[in-house]
Image: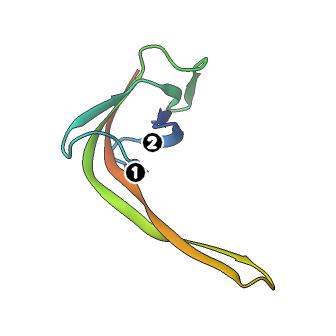
C-alpha cells in the first residue's frame, strides 16, 4: 500500500515505515504529524484518486530530527569581464518516518 501525499508544497510517494527528507517543518523532534492532503492511494491494486484530495484519508508521521543537506555551490562568471562570484548554501531538511496510512 502506498500513497501520494502533499507535504510542505511538494508531492511524495510514501509507504509505511519509510524514511523521507522534506523541507524544514516547524515541529519538535519526536512529535507526531498528520497530513490530510492525500492525492492518491493504491491499496493492493485498488486505486483511489482524489479531486484534488481524498476526503477522510490521512498519513501520520513522526519527526526524527532536523538536518542540513549537502552544500550547493553557486558560481557566476561573465567571460572577458573579470567578474566572478562564488556563493553557496546548505538547505534545511526534516527527516520523518511514515507510521500509518489511513483511508
In the image, taking residue 46 as reference, residue 26 lies left or right, namely left
Task: Using the rendered view, name the quadrant where residue 67 is placed.
Answer: bottom left
Are there few (<14), some (14-19), or many (20+) residues within 10 Å of tag 1? some
Q: Which mark is residue 20?
A: 1
Are there few (<14), some (14-19), or many (20+) residues within 10 Å of tag 2? many
Image x and y of residue 20, in percent: 40, 51
Residue at 40% across, 52% down: 21
Q: Is residue 58 above or below residue 71?
A: above
Say whether disc 1 or disc 2 marks the residue closer to the N-terminus: 2
Residue at 37% across, 48% down: 18
In the image, taking residue 93 as reference, residue 79 lies left or right, namely right
Image x and y of residue 95, in percent: 33, 52
1 or 31: nearer the viewer: 31
| Residue placed under numbered mark 2 in the picture | 14
Q: In the picture, which quadrant includes the C terminus? A: top left
Residue at 59% across, 20% down: 52
37 or 25: nearer the viewer: 25
Q: Are marks 1 and 2 in contact (CB under 8 Å)?
A: yes
In the image, taking residue 55 as reference, residue 75 lies left or right, namely right
Amino acid at each position: 500500500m502506498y500513497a501520494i501525499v502533499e507535504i510542505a508544497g511538494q508531492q511524495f510517494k510514501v509507504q509505511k515505515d519509510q524514511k523521507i527528507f522534506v523541507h524544514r517543518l516547524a515541529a519538535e523532534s519526536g512529535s507526531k504529524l498528520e497530513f490530510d492532503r492525500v492525492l492518491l492511494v493504491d491499496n493492493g491494486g485498488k486505486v483511489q484518486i482524489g479531486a484534488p484530495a481524498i476526503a477522510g484519508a490521512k498519513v501520520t508521521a513522526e519527526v526524527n530530527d532536523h538536518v542540513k543537506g549537502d552544500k550547493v555551490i553557486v558560481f557566476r562568471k561573465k567571460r572577458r569581464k573579470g567578474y566572478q562570484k562564488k556563493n553557496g548554501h546548505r538547505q534545511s531538511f526534516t527527516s520523518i518516518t511514515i507510521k500509518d496510512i489511513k483511508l
